[in-house]
Image: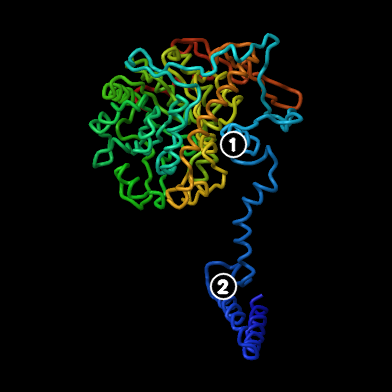
Amino acid sequence: MRKRFYRVASISLILSTILTWLWPPAGWLLALVAGIVMLGLYDIFQTRHTILRNYPLWGHWRWIMEWLRPMIYQYFIESDTNGVPVNRMFRSVVYQRAKGVLDTVPLGTKMDTYRSGYEWMDHSLTALDAKDLELDPRIIIGGPDCKQPYSASILNISAMSFGALSKHAILALNGGAKIGGFAHNTGEGGLSPYHLEPGGDLIWQIGTGYFGCRDEQGGFSEQGFAEKASLDNIKMIEIKLSQGAKPGHGGILPAIKNTLEIAEIRGVQPNTQVNSPPTHSAFSTPLEMMQFIQLLREHSGGKPIGFKLCIGRKSEFIALCKAMLKTGIKPDFITVDGGEGGTGAAPLEYTNSVGTPLREGLAFVVDCLIGFDLKKDIRVIASGRIFSGFHMVRLLAQGADLCNSARGMMMALGCIQSLECNKNTCPTGVATQDPALYEGMNVADKRQRVENLHKLTVESVVELIAAAGLTSPDQLKRCDIQRRVSSDRVRSYDEIYPSLEPGCLLQEPYPEPFNKLLQRAHAEHF
């Protein structure tokens, strides 16, 4: 190819030179040919890409096609049900509900109801009229030691930081939460003016970097925490132990997103990649963590305190339960994130292969709390791939009290799944700090779409509950959800995830799956 390039380049230069000599206006053609020849020569003599050295000029098509590939696949090849990370069917229902337009589908389901993994809910012959039920169910979060319990919606905005998202995205999310009366989790990036300005309810997340309550050494600042925790907007505080997309890794803010404003809010150096530590420095054992929960409760005036985690080593969660019993200090809520959770930036291995998926992790957490007789005082929040009412119903049936959604809310803002979150080039202005991109987002329009999505999704949950002949989400049980496990076999959730009897983990004999886990778990260490 290189010899052929030399021949074609020489002939083209000679012919364009002759043409220019005969007809001077053709000089533009000579300039164009010369530029192309120079690019080809650069391809031959550069040393980084073998394809370009062997196929000068033509080799560039590889990069062009790589750039076009995801767009061609999403718009022209993928079906309504096979797209990833979020398929077109669920993207469409989010867009439709956010816009308040027709969200029904014609001619029946596009899902293969006989494939392994297909799930459905049992309906009742004594179905109720959803209009007779509470269309905005609320859950009170706050245990015996909580002085300021919070009445939460069953659907809230999951943790996404300012930094990962643009200021316009944060303003729209919190504005939607304000209109709809639901909560907005700040993410571990700390409180920003854009979280506070609209006046929506906030769940302040405190991660391992302690952004927003950080001392000069990067540790936890009691004074900094107390100053912010007293704000009226902050309704709950969440300690982030891990997140589903990269458990055991810590958050990542790419340098290109770490602007001067974000660095000032977080207390870090601007224009540098910010990696949160994988673990907390404020505590190192389950017992110390319970004392930290008590400290936050005291400095916040008794607001609900909880923690978020993706289940990994199961004995470590049991150790936390043992620490709760030993100290008498309990969180008011626990957020369970699934290994399928989304993020703006994570190593491939963590995204694909670390962390327990949500349904298995949620069932384990709920069962542990029931087994240790703790569930009556602790609310459980489920977070991970929630786009429809059925997604919520199956989690509520497993024992969750309420749900959080992140990517669904991003799509309500206009996210088109361009997969540019980690490059600062999000074309819709959602996950970027480039003013040229995020200033195109109309905050007033998007906040209404966030509220629309929340309202219509919650209403769809109520309709499903009514179809089952139930009157409230807490009446859902694992036996209400069915899963096809093979072409000729169906099992209900209570068969796949057998429930425990209250208090059964407090004394022997223990249920068989928990024997070894209880032996390994100690309140004194993880």
User: Residue at horizontal 40%, vertical 27%?
Assistant: 201
Depicted 37 relative to depicted 307: above or below: below
Which residue position is annotated with label 1?
95
- Element type where label 1 sits in the image: helix
Place residue 53 in its image quadrant.
bottom right
Place residue 297 in its image quadrant.
top left
* Position of residue 385 measured from the top left corner of the image (x, y, whole percent): 56, 32
Depicted 189 relative to depicted 107: above or below: below
Inter-mark Cα distance, 1 to 2 = 44 Å
Q: Is residue 456 left or right of residue 442?
A: right
Place residue 473 in its image quadrant.
top right
Depicted 121 relative to depicted 173: above or below: above
Could you tell me if residue 201 is visible in this image?
A: yes
- Quarter of the image with the N terminus is bottom right
* Position of residue 451 measured from the top left corner of the image (x, y, whole percent): 50, 30
Which numbered dot is residue 425? none
Q: Nearer the viewer, residue 501 or 8?
A: 8
User: Residue at horizontal 43%, vertical 30%?
Assistant: 184
- Name the N-terminal-most of marks 1 and 2: 2
Q: Nearer the viewer, residue 437 or 486?
A: 437
* Position of residue 195 measured from the top left corner of the image (x, y, whole percent): 38, 35
Q: Name the amino acid type tagged 1.
A: Tyr
- Element type where label 2 sits in the image: helix
* Position of residue 449 measured from the top left corner of the image (x, y, whole percent): 53, 34
The reply to whether callout 1 and callout 2 are in contact (CB within 8 Å) is: no
Q: Nearer the viewer, residue 365 or 439?
A: 439
Which residue position is annotated with label 2?
43
